[in-house]
Structure formats: structure tokens, C-alpha cells
Amino acid sequence: MTNPIDAPTLEKPLLALDRVTKDFSSDGGQVARALDEVSLSINKGETLGVVGETGAGKSTLIRCATRLCDVTRGRVFFNGTDITDHHQSELVPLRKRMQIVFQDPYGSLNPRHRVGSIIGEPLVIHENAQGTELKDRVEEAMKLVGLDPAASDRYPSDFSGGQRQRINIARAMILKPEFVVCDEPVSALDVSVQAQILNLLQDMQTEFGLTFLFVSHDLDVIRHMSTRVAVMNKGRIVECQPTSELFAAPQNAYTKSLLGC
């Protein structure tokens, strides 16, 4: 099978990992390998779905891809630039261009902060926005995700799970990023609400040309959202194909087993 990073594309990938390995050391000196020679690429405007069982390495992949943690070996590229060895101060401008929608719509919001403050915080940090500009941008972001701007003075506890996830999405979108990581964004929501959030993400991708790394254990969600799918097992990508091809004719034995379940 062709290495996904070497697959032909019309333009350079927005994000690429080249043989990335990540080891974690315990206090006892033992080493656990979370990622093992992982290579992948994500083209501008597409959604790469990543699926695998618990412990497959999906969360570590997210952290390495967004440089929230260092890699042990290998290289990470964003828009053609090698960011593997960038210090945190060098990554600050990059944070505006890549954002994360977290899994837990409850734990990812500070319960002591008002919603307007939560959504506007990235603007304060990255653009020093304040006053009328900050207020207007927060209202714009809330409208974008289907929330009433009049609710900006309320606290997260006043909202339902689906509304809290919309708050998370508004916070991620307020900086107008190019690349968004969706880390199990609907797994904590009721089935009736999941479709609303997925449709919202797709609408925003179409409107703003977003590129998604979409991580989930739910095969139906992955099938619905993804342009291509990468299957992870024990820290490795065992198969990466266009979505329709992977579901119709999986090549790897683990993929066949996963789909069979």
C-alpha cells in the first residue's frame, strides 16, 4: 500500500507527519510507545478521519500533530514548514491557524467564566482584542454556531450539552483558523443532537474552506464526515484509503475486523 504521505496531491498538504514516533517513559524507566513510525498527510479543504479502538494512539496523534507535545522521532510539517523543533514561543502564531474542538462539552468549559468571556478568550490572547471589537467578534461567532448573542452573559451550566459543544466550536472558530482538530466532538452528546453538530461542522467547512482532522471511534460518524480514513492500531496506521473505498473493500485484516464489529 502506498505510504499516505507519498500519495500524489495537486498541492502540498496543509499538515503532514513523516515517520513520527512518540515514546513515554515511566518513573520506573520503562518506555511505552504510543506512536510508531506514523506518516500521514491532510490536504487543504479535506477531512481526514482517524478511527481505532481505545489505546490505538489517536489522542497522542492529535497532540503530536498540533505540537502540544514533542515527538521522539520523525518530522511534523504545517503548510510545508517543518515545525518539529519549534519552541512554544515560535508556535504562538501557529495556534491561530489550528484549533481543537474537544470531546467533553462539559469539562472543556470553565464553569466560573461567562460564555462570552470563554468564546472571546482566544482573541484576547492572540490579538489583544478588547472593547467593542471583542464584543462584536464574540456575537458574530455565537451567531455562526446558532447561539443567541444575548446569552453571552450566562454560564456554561445554563446550557445543554449540544449548546455547550456549539460554544466550544465558536471558541475554536473565532480566530478564523485553517485547520481544526475534532476530537470525538459528538461522543458525549445525545444521538438526537449529534447530527446537528456534525451538520454545523460540515456547513462551516464548506463556507470557510476548513481542513479537518476528525477523530472518532464511531464508524458511522467517520463515514459521514471523512474524505479519507486512516485506521490506527497499536500506535500505527495500518490502512489509509478514500472513505468509500475503505468501507467497501478494506485491505487490512484489522480494518476488516473493526468494520465487522
Image (tube, rainbow, N blue to C red):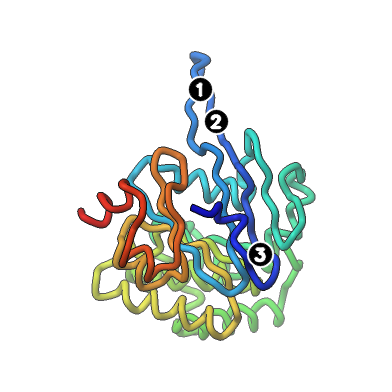
| Residue 52 image point, x, y percent | 36, 50
Q: Residue at x 41, y 52 (%)?
A: 231
Q: Which residue is mark 3?
A: 14
Q: Total number of numbered labels?
A: 3
Name the one closer to the observer, 195 or 22: 22
Q: Which label was assigned to residue 23?
A: 2
Relative placement, left or right, of 13 versus 110 is right
Q: Circle 3 sits in a helix, a strand or a loop, which is it?
A: loop
Q: CA distance from mark 2 to mark 1?
A: 6 Å
Check whether the beta carbons of the residues at disc 2 and disc 1 lie within 8 A of each other: yes
Q: Residue furthest front?
A: 1
Instruction: State which quadrant residue 4 falls in.
Output: bottom right
Alpha carbon distance from label 3 to label 1? 31 Å
x and y percent of residue 253 in the render? Answer: 31, 47
For disc 3, the neighbor class at 10 Å (few under 14, some 14 to 19, many from 20) is some
Mark 2, Cα crowd under 10 Å, few <14 / some 14-19 / many 20+, is some
Q: Amino acid at mark 1?
A: Val
Looking at the picture, does residue 201 appear above or below residue 37? below
Q: Is residue 188 visible?
A: no
Q: Is residue 238 above or below residue 94?
A: above
**In the image, what residue type sits under mark 3?**
Leu
Q: Is residue 176 visible?
A: yes
N-terminal label among 3 and 1:
3
